[in-house]
Image (cartoon, coloured by chain):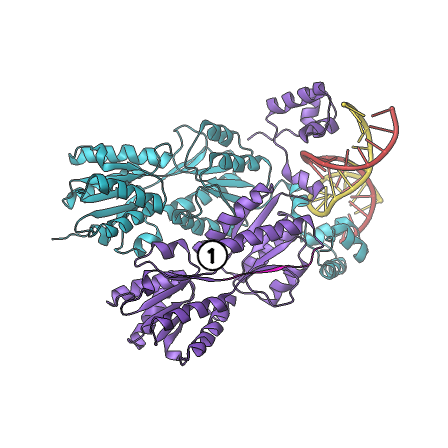
Chain colours: A cyan, B purple, C red, D yellow
Amino acid sequence: MPDGPTITTIAEHAGVSIASVSRVLNGLPTRPETERKVMRAADELGYVRNAVARSLKSRRTHQIAFAMADIGNPVYLAMVRQIQPVLKTAGYRLVLHSTDAVVADEIDVLRSLGERYVDGLIMSPIRVTDDHLKMIENARAPVVIIGLVPDGTAVDNVRADSREGVRLAVGHLHERGRRRIGFLNGPLDTVPGAARDAAFREALEECGLPYDPALVEVGDFYREAGAQAARRLLERDGDVDALMCANDLIALGALDVLRQYGKRVPQDVAVVGMDDTDLAAASWPTLTSVSLGSAERGRAAAQLLLARLEDGGRAPTVVTVPPRLIVRESTLETS
Amino acid sequence: MPDGPTITTIAEHAGVSIASVSRVLNGLPTRPETERKVMRAADELGYVRNAVARSLKSRRTHQIAFAMADIGNPVYLAMVRQIQPVLKTAGYRLVLHSTDAVVADEIDVLRSLGERYVDGLIMSPIRVTDDHLKMIENARAPVVIIGLVPDGTAVDNVRADSREGVRLAVGHLHERGRRRIGFLNGPLDTVPGAARDAAFREALEECGLPYDPALVEVGDFYREAGAQAARRLLERDGDVDALMCANDLIALGALDVLRQYGKRVPQDVAVVGMDDTDLAAASWPTLTSVSLGSAERGRAAAQLLLARLEDGGRAPTVVTVPPRLIVRESTLETS
DNA sequence: TTGTAGGCGTTATCAG
DNA sequence: CTGATAACGCCTACAA
């Protein structure tokens, strides 16, 4: 692992000044002769530009970070798949951070922004604390938040409308004749968890259905947690005829458990997920799911970030992506 | 977005020299009085250390990259989950790169090593070209490769034994009385694809079964590709009684298709996957799979990297993780 | 067109 | 214990 050559090394080998080397390397006008000498030396020495030194001067790293709560959730996958090409086209490299929904880690990523390792950050925090908000607003580089932040927070923000999403789903179940609709949610101290809880109550009311706490289970946004929640619910109440799940992973866990209990889906119990991840289309039965537009949100976030990178002065923008209900087998008509 | 204060700013505010500021910030012995002044100024100004400048000097970034071929493959997830804590404990932050198995992107990540943005790299390339090997051996920072590289390559290397893995799986199917064993593989120009192809032929021979090209399909390592491959195979030959799949995603795709064709698993067709990802345990029926020890491989890779970071001189190490067959419903005895 | 020199923010060495 | 000061590798006026 030889210590790399620097422009100084090259300058010596080529018999020119470091300034000339730098110019050649950056494609500035140079005499062909000089250029050739420099390029040859650089090649022979296997020169690689030290990006750290370069960004110390230029204050640009050409890197952008995407901090996701759970790398195992395909919803973030869908986002990455959109963000990646947008940024790449604009000349940025995407680096990914998995925070495992640990607030401390998210804060750490935010701080690392101040450390100048990246030019900007897209972040999808699952819990938003005051610390978050403070750091976000004071961040030294552009930040885009995917998810709900309090109105008036001075930050570019891409939102899903999970409230409308839940309404769509519950309305759909109601139309299909379901009346005992269970709800498997994630933690209430998370932003999506809280939003979906409120939305569920509202949606029931709109359908004229009572809110029955016995039909609600709170767990976590993972498949196994979804399975456990479903199990608890079924043990307590064998009569649910539908399950509204706060995301697809929970729904998949629920499907597993329903199968174990010998419940047919959708005949005995209809199931709806949220996020419309790839897994929804691939499960068995295929899963009806509310798309919260993760792909669109990813793309929008990337674009917002690029826009701000261009013009730091523009007013914070909020983009809201509308939900769509994707009906699949798990809620099919069963006449 | 105010431009951040530097140690110079702090020094002025605190009325001390920048050297003292640096010392305090790095916890070097300082007079309490000075320390207090500095800390107060730093606090008030909201100082964040400029990591870029710091690493220009220290030649350390405290960041390590993990470049994976496909962020959507849970096998990498399992690795990340192991790598993350090991590195974190040692004071490194893990940054993830998804190369989508594009060779150019992998080379780019390798080059970025020379750019000094990270102190080391763990990489799981799916295709290994000469360019790769050259760059790896000449890399300016430690690299650990997860996957097969040619013997004698001077690099720390963690391997799975997919050959033995395929043997286990095919042997298992043979024992269960299966005689027309189909094989759904990934691209043959990939390292795992080639290895598994060779292993499959060998394994058949060992069982005294003939190699029948009509029972072999080559696609890609994704679920949808697996489904397509299975479909092609079934259209051509309705009599297979087992499917050996080169990874779990392919196997899941195959399960989808078998269901569509009305084939019962395992009664009509037994299915084996590889990698033993979470999805294998969660599919329906649950999927027998060959664990190639992805978790262990991840951990080993992280440890190897740390070891080399400590001592750049040690000889390249090769760790091989043995496979294990995890039998689940998809190959259950059906007597 | 080319070279010299200063600075980006830190750390580390060396006198005081 | 503290304060100048010289790097780290690169970019960029400015001068030649």
Chain identity of mark 1? B
Left/right placement of residue B295 relative to residue D12 reads: left
Left/right placement of residue B213 relative to residue D13 reads: left
Left/right placement of residue A246 relative to residue B143 reads: left
Going 67% across and 26% down the picture, which residue do you hit? Answer: B9
In the displayed structure, would residue B261 be above or below residue B319? below
Numbered-mark total: 1
In the displayed structure, would residue A40 be above or below residue A69? below
Q: Residue furthest left?
A: A335
Going 40% across and 47% down the picture, which residue do you hit? Answer: A73
Residue B222 in view, yes or no: no
The answer to whether residue A6 is magenta is no
Left/right placement of residue A335 relative to residue B52 reads: left
Where residue A109 sits: x, y (%)? 53, 38
Where residue A289 sits: x, y (%)? 28, 48
Going 59% across and 43% down the picture, which residue do you hit? Answer: B92
- Most foreground residue, A308 or A115: A115
Which amino acid, mark 1? Asp
- Most foreground residue, A275 or A188: A188
Label 1: element kind: loop
Where residue A71 sits: x, y (%)? 44, 47
Q: Label 1 belongs to which residue?
A: B70
Where residue A119 sits: x, y (%)? 56, 41
Q: Quadrant of the C terminus of chain B?
A: bottom left
Going 50% across and 67% down the picture, which residue do you hit? Answer: B190
Residue A39 picture quarter: bottom right
In the displayed structure, would residue A109 be above or below residue A138? below
In the displayed structure, would residue B296 be above or below residue A211? below
Give the magenta part as a residue range.
Answer: B314-322
Q: Residue furthest top?
A: B33
